[in-house]
Amino acid sequence: MHAFGRLSRLALTAVAAALPLAASAADEQVNFYNWANYIADDTLPNFTKQTGIKVVYDVFDTNELLETKLLAGSTGYDVVVPGSDFMARQIKAGAFMELDKSKIPNLAKLDPVIMERLAEFDPENRYGVPYMWGTTGIGYNIDKMQEIFGKDVKIDSWEFVFNPENMKKLESCGIAVLDNPTEIYATVLNYLGKDPNKATAEDFSGVATDTMMKIRPFIRYFHSSKFITDLANGDICLAIAWSGDILQARDRAQEAKNNVNVGYTIPKEGALMWLDIMTIPKDAKHADAAHKLINYLLEPKVMAANSDAVSYANAVADSWPLIKPEVRNHEGIFPPPEVAAKLFVLKPLDQKTSRVVTRSWTRVRSGR
Amino acid sequence: MFSKLLHKQGRWLVLAVPYVWLLLFFLVPFLIVFKISLSSPELAMPPYSDMFLHEGSTVQIVLNFDNYLALFRDSLYLNSYLQSLEMAAFSTLICLAIGYPLAWVIAHSDPKLRNILLMLVVLPSWTSSLLRIYAWMNILNTNGPFNDVLLALGLISEPLELLHTNTAVYIGIVYNYLPFMVLPLYSAIMKLDHTLIEAAADLGARPLKVITSVVLPLTKSGIIAGSMLVFIPAVGEFMIPELLGGPDNLLIGRVLWQEFFNNRDWPLASAVATTMLLLLVLPMLLFQRSQNEELKGEKK
């Protein structure tokens, strides 16, 4: 009995000694799942230097991939960055942990207008903090466009892209489109003068699909990350894609000095604006470190450096004056008020419409 | 007495290992997929309904067979099954056409050289196949080395568009699965008794006749084994068509991806997967039978 008592006491001390150790060891890591090409190279190393927390970084290029992992559960990630419309649905499915706002003092530095917009997706902003935002517009090889359509060509309208005559001329030099049914359909419906958030299943499978089918024969591929390299190398000359990614292609071409000049336009009919939101999965193992990482990313200096690196706008108002002028003054990144007024956001689709959208998109992709 | 017992026990143990393996890594996952295929999609984690409904002391089992019926309501599924089977079948034939002469040459070369040649067949598998397919993306690119060489040789005046076409997918699949065809063919050709070929020739058979009535029948087991090893994984291949293929190919792997990721419809995705498995069981049974026949032949 005596021996047993001593043994159990010993065991208890061992457990007690191990507990704080385990807790600090657990806090020394945070698993971050973010979009590809979406952060400056030194952001995470600097975070580790400042806090001692190791970051395991992993990337994705479609919301669907992240959503499937989240719904399956036990992702192992502590911070994930879904688009706002996907986040709204994931909140309903119970995928996230409510944020402990006392641990994120930098929330005060966020732009109230953007936070109010976000509250439509996440009431009271309980689960998410905006990371960056951008638009889905037209990226193009400036010289190739002038070569094919003449010196005075103006790519300022969706009409340019959805006119099969124009696209036919670009077939051989290469057209890429995001493999993203919800965003591309919203773009097409907006061009057709319909509100994407009020569209019926018939709008998606009918007029929107017909419009895409007319330019389909000239599209080389549908993909959501490959176009950056191809646009920078001159392997394709037009892409319907995300603002920052296209401008990163421009930067890469400039670095490579390969004489490829890339431009990005938000067409005059308006474009889809999306927000990517930092959230913490419900079963995150390093929630404390996750809050610290989110707070660090909202640091105005850090956020400004990220916007500089990836050419996306952010929601931290205090960071805006710190962003370099080429980015701050680019109309495709921080659109002027008259352009911003034409941007629209997308609400999540219901399951039935979503199925019609996927099916119609399969028709568009396969061209049948 | 004891050693006899050990012998019996040992045999049981040796037999148990593959069965436990199959049970854990094949049957159990399959049953899970099958169970999901009988539920309906829901916005939850995980995103499908529970099979068992508890209400007080009664447990109701809810089975939803609609997912299987849905496969017939839209021609998409049937078409992509057919396209996948077609692509796998042609890839297998091309592998056979390249692999058979290759295996023949290896089997008939000098023993020292033979090991090196065999090594060369297997060597590429030492790097990840994903990396090798990425290398092919580079090679086949419009501005890539393949076109550069052809242009430099003056064989073409404009670069060929190979990447994102079905040709590229065939190149990728044949390249990736060729070793699986060559190795069983090689072992079958090695076992071939050459006196039989000589005898056939001595008895007046022309070369073509020797091949069709002596060589091919005697290496049949290798042909079947190699073809199965290529065909079965090629049907469900997702990575190669996704990276090298164009958007117009609609293989079953892609359809599965869409149901799972775009539609969040795990039940229907599971029904697609279960059906594909059933489609593949048939060739696998044929393979099994030919293997058994070969074993019987050896016993004689």
Image (cartoon, coloured by chain):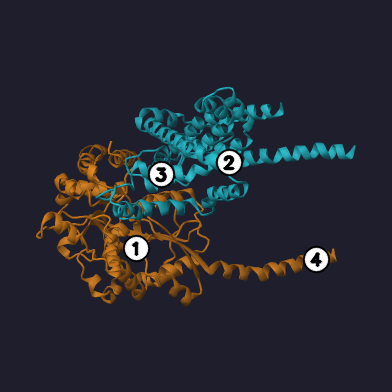
Chain colours: A orange, B cyan
Residue A208 appears at what percent x and percent y?
22, 42
Q: Which residue is mark 2?
A: B108
Find numbered disc 1 in the image and state the secondary structure of the residue it sits on. strand
- Provide the chain ID for the residue under circle 4: A
Pair 4/1: label in front:
1
B200 vs A337, left or right, is right
Q: Secondary structure at mark 2?
A: loop
Cα distance, mark 2 to mark 4? Answer: 76 Å
**Quadrant showing the N terminus of chain A:** bottom right
Q: Nearer the N terminus, badge 2 or badge 3?
A: 2
The numbered disc on residue A130 is 1
Task: Nearest to the eye among marks 3 and 1: give it.
Answer: 3
Q: Which kind of residue does numbered mark 1 sit on?
A: Pro
Give whichever of A65, B182 is nearer the camera: B182
Marks 3/4 in contact by CB < 8 Å: the verdict is no
Query: In the drawing, what numbered circle is on residue A216?
Result: none
Q: CA distance from mark 4 to mark 1?
A: 54 Å
User: Mark 4: which amino acid?
Assistant: Gly
